Image (cartoon, helix red, strand yellow):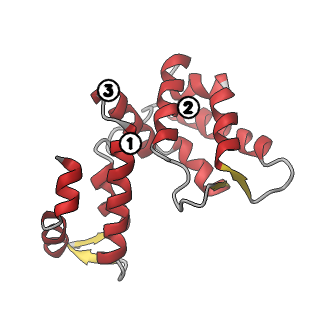
Amino acid sequence: DGQIVKAEFTRLFDPAVIAAADPTKAAAAKLRAKVSSLWAAIASTGQAEVGRTACWSAILADEELAKLVGKGMPARGKQLLEVMKAMRGLDVNGDDAIDAEEFARLYLPANLAAAEEAVNTGLAPAYLFALRTKVESMWKVIGFRGEVERIECWDFVLADAELASIMG
């Protein structure tokens, strides 16, 4: 339709959005189920939110989750989870608390693919976090209507000196 919405715009910081975390439906279903059960355990007192640090402590201590994320290789899974933590891949609103919706980002293919890309390319998580933060702040400026015309969007992106500096 020639319009860019936020989900499309934020692909700027997710170079591997097309790549799925695991192409098999069974593995993806297992990962979703594990993430759901882990959230239920973490938020067992009925809390709507849990502190970011407590969430990551539980996530990184869970060997089964690491094995699922690493597609059978727990060490690789832990490495990917560490990158997601460094990129602040869950706390999207920056309030240092994780709710159920944010926690579910653990199994989103785009997040897993971004972590894979960071590990595979050696991109620093701090760089990816800065890039994500910049892209999200840019969307607040240009995407206030919920969508933006494609040419206008690219003019905006290409004219941003700070984004160019971050990207190198």
Secondary-structure class at tag 3: helix
Q: Residues within 10 Å of mark 1 (few under 14, many from 20)?
A: few
Residue 16 image-quadrant placement: top left
Which residue position is annotated with label 3? 120
Which residue position is annotated with label 1? 126
Which residue position is annotated with label 2? 26
Q: Nearer the viewer, residue 69 or 167?
A: 167
Q: Earlier in the sequence, mark 2 or mark 1?
A: 2
Residue 70 can be seen in this image: no
Asked whether, in this view, residue 159 is left or right of residue 98, the answer is left
Asked whether, in this view, residue 32 is left or right of residue 125, the answer is right
Question: How many angstroms separate mark 1 from mark 3 (CA)?
Answer: 15 Å
Mark in the foreground, 1 or 3: 1
Q: Residues within 10 Å of mark 3 (few under 14, many from 20)?
A: few
Secondary-structure class at tag 2: helix
User: Could you tell me the amino acid type at mark 2?
Assistant: Ala
Residue 6 image-quadrant placement: bottom left
Q: Nearer the viewer, residue 168 or 105?
A: 168
Question: How many angstroms separate mark 3 from mark 2 (CA)?
Answer: 25 Å
Picture layout, residue 41 above or below residue 101: above
Question: Residue at the bottom extreme?
Answer: 145
Residue 135 image-quadrant placement: bottom left
Q: Are marks 1 and 3 in contact (CB under 8 Å)?
A: no
In the image, which disc is placed on residue 113?
Answer: none
Q: Position of residue 156 (x, y in %)?
A: 18, 71
Residue name at image x 43 percent, y 35 percent: 21
Q: Nearer the viewer, residue 24 or 116?
A: 116
User: Could you tell me the amino acid type at mark 1?
Assistant: Ala
